[in-house]
Structures are given as structure tokens and as C-alpha cells.
Image (cartoon, rainbow, N blue to C red):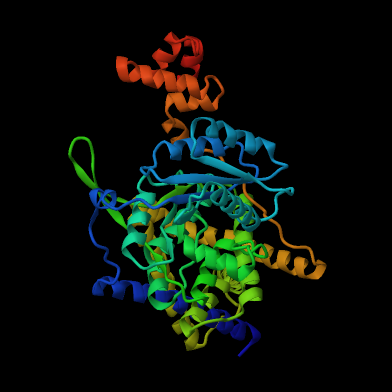
Amino acid sequence: MSFLDWFVVVIAACYIIFAIDDLIFDVTYWFGRLMGWWERPRVRQADLDAVPQKKIAWLIPAWSEDEVIAGMLTYNLGRIDYDRYDVWVGTYQNDPATQQEVAKVAQFSPRVRWVVTDHDGPTSKADCMNNIVAGLQRHELATGERYDLIVMHDPEDIIHPLEFKLTNWYFSSEEVDFVQLPVLSTSPKWYDFVAGTYIDEFSEMYAKNMYVRQRLTPFVPSAGVATTMRRSALEELIDETGGLPYAVNSLTEDYDLGLKMAIADRRTKFLSQKIEVTDEDGKTSEELVATWAPFPHTFDTAVRQRTRWMSGIVFQAWEHWKWPGTLGLKWVLAHDRRGPFGYLVVLFGYLLVLALVSYEWVRTFYDPTLPKVLQHPAFTTLFFIGIFLLVNRLLQRAIAVHRFYGLGQALLAIFRTPFSNLVNMVASFRAAWRYWYSQATGKPMTWDKTSHAIPPVIARSLRIGERLVLAGKITPQQLMLALGAQRQRQRPIGEILVSQGAISRSELRAELGA
């Protein structure tokens, strides 16, 4: 065979190996559906309400989040259906803007506490989280109170109102140390292919792959958000690591946390649970308890974010952990770390297809005397195997997206797949370069965070009083007085604020029209 023949065989063989790796997830998941492995018991909101509440510490690392943190904190604090919790925000001493926004919310919510590092940022999410934990421990020593559960979230997360009640119920009924809930991207416009790649990949992860990982391996990775761990497990990590529970030498401390727990044989679970809720009219419905968050909408920001993910998951995790544990764990680690090589194969595959199509176009329409290529019968077999695996891959992704986002986005997911591969391809090569440069120079890779903005749906959902406080138009005390008057007079809160002289009618109209 010619060099081209061998090249095609090697690319096709690698592609088929990776496709079979994905096929294991597909077959296991659908077999599990038939066997009822993934079924969860019916849970009503009344069942959650009946469980005594554990004390929860909600942790948020924040660097340069002044545009989003106050609004998102206000939104979530006003809607979380739970009593015994505090929110701990980690900020940096050289980021006064974020501290100022957190202080705004702390004025009217005694739940909000924040920790300021004694060094400049940004460092890493792990370093920020370790500072939060240290501040939390100092608070416990000073007050004598103790938290039972630790919940991790990012500043831009939209938290389900029943998340804390669900995890409280689950930790009370199950012997578990660590729980990961589904994390999904807010739905983008149909033409926004960058943001669409996130809903495609997250849908497949949380509609299928997480179930299979939990069944075949002890490793349930943390997403860094919607992750809850038992306080005793955190204490063990602190003891084992000399006071630093989160790995500061990893850009993906969340992934590292889940792997650390799996290796230590701790009980980790993925929990995808629907809750039966009853509205004010007595109608019942089921809601999936999941965290939703906006993700990057531009090619550059998506590449930078995925570069961080791949740097930590592929290179740093391999450097720190090698290949520990059971055969199942080794297989999942190989699956997670295949990114750079896998996308190199995809790149060569795309170039090969482009070259062959171009050649056949020229041979058919311009120069029929050119010789045919790839005439061996084996190439036909490889072609049809590849087509079957490709169609299966597209179908599996579309089914997963349909589960969360409906038919329209499911169909778009098919067309977004090549674009998703392109984004991940660039991120893989950038991650490989950054890791090599770090190793060659001895300079650690830093927290290359992406900027966030409050999703429009959340901005519109903020109550008028919340928006006025955040805008600095009224004080928290003025809002509390107006709310007290509203309970007696049943008038719109804006009208009461105007009548009390807290705000002018023109300012109210301007805010309502915002």
C-alpha cells in the first residue's frame, strides 16, 4: 500500500478506537435504561420539607466578578427555599470592586460573609477556595457553630430553589460523602453556535455519561458547581493535605477533588432527581433539580475556558496521579485524557476528507485521466463502519439535547458537532502548548478565567426593590420599611417607596423601564 493508504488506515483505526470508547457509554446507558438501573424514587417537596435541616456553607470563589456577583447573589438568596445556610464568598485584596459588590448584598442579608486573601490575585480557584475554608474554620472557632455540608458554586450560577433541601434529604437518607447534581447551560439563541456547544456537551454528560461513570467506576467528577460534600470528608482532606483541601497545583481543582475521593474509596454519587411540586393553584408538576449557568458566547472565551479544563484534566491530572485504581478507573481516566490526541486525529481526518473530496471533484469534472485512489476493498468497509459510528454519535447527542432543550436544539446539535470539534481542537493544542511552556520555564499556569454577565432572564427576574438596592437608589433599610408597609396596605412596592420619599417617581419609571 502507498503512504496515503497507510495514512488512511491509521486515521480510521484511531477514529474507530475512540468511537468504540464512546460506544461503551452508549450501550451501557441504554442497557441500564432497559434494566431500570437509572430509575429514581418519586420524591415530593413535602418529603424534603420533613427532613431536619443540616447547616450548609455555600462557597463561591470570586475574582473580578463585580459585574455579576451582587445581582446573582441577590437573585439566588431571594429564591433558595432553605433556612440553615450561609454563603461564603472568597475575594482578593487587589479586587476592591468585587468586595464592594459583595458588601452591598451583605447589608441586607446576614447570610453573606466574605473572606479576603492576604495576597493579590488571581491565583487559582483552588487557592481562593482554600482561603474561604480557612475563614470558615476561623468563624466556627469564634462562634462555636458548625457546618454539616459544604456546597460549591460559581458567581454566575442559577441555583434551583430546592437544591439545598434535596441535598439535605439525600445526605440524611444515604451514606454518601460527595454528591454532584446536573449542571446545564442556559439555552442560547439558535444561531449562537459557540454557546450551543456547551448545551450539547453538558446534555450528553448529565443525561447519559455520568450515569455510566458511576456504574462502571468509583469516580464521579465534580463540576466545581452544584457539588456538595459532607463536612467530615472535607476535614479528612484537610488532615491529609496539611490544611489545603483543594489542590493549588491544578487548574481543575473540582475534577481533582472527585478523583481524590475515588482513590480514597469515599462514597461519591451523581444525583439526577426530579421533585414533585405543587403550585398555589394546586397543580402538580415535576422539576429537575439542576444548576443552570451562562457560558461563553465567543470563540476566544470558549477556547480559553476549555484550555483551562484540558490543562487540568489531561496534563496536570496525569502528572499528579498517573494511572491509579481499578481497571474501570484507568479506562475513565484514559477517556478523559484522550482530548489532545483525539482532536489531532479529528484534525487529520477533516484534512484527509477535504483532500479526497477535492481530488475526486477535480478528477470527475476536470481531469478524468487522474488515477483513482483508495481502491482496496478494506477502505469501503472502513468507510461504512465510520459512517455508522458517526451517525450513532450524532444521534446520541441529539437525544441527550432533546431531553433538556427540545427538538429544535436537538436538531441544531447535529450541525454544531463539527464546530464543537473545532473549538475543542484549538483548546487542546493551546492547553498542550501552555503545559509544555510551564514545564520548560517553571512558571505555573494561572487562573485564566472568563468574564461573566448576568443573564437577561435573571436581570428581568430581579424584583424592583432588589434592583433599586443594587443600583444604590435606596438603602436596604428603606426597602425593609416599604415591605413592612406593603403587608398592611397591599400596594405596589414602587408606589410605597415613592410615597415614603425613598425614590422619585421618575427614578422609579426609569428602573421599571430598564
Q: Quadrant of residue 246?
A: bottom right
Residue at 43% in and 23% down: 480
With respect to residue 405, does 266 lie above or below?
below
**Picture coordinates of residue 180, whole percent (x, y):** 43, 61
Residue at 53% in and 46% down: 143
The answer to whether residue 315 is seen in the rendering is yes
- Front residue of 188/127: it is 127
Q: Quadrant of residue 471?
A: top right
With respect to residue 104, does 480 lie above or below?
above
With respect to residue 255, does 184 lie above or below?
above
Residue at 58% in and 54% down: 133
Q: Is residue 405 left or right of residue 259?
A: left
Indicate the quadrant containing the N terminus: top left, top right, bottom left or bottom right: bottom right
**Picture coordinates of residue 78, whole percent (x, y):** 41, 36
Q: Residue furthest left?
A: 282
**Picture coordinates of residue 211, whole percent (x, y):** 37, 68
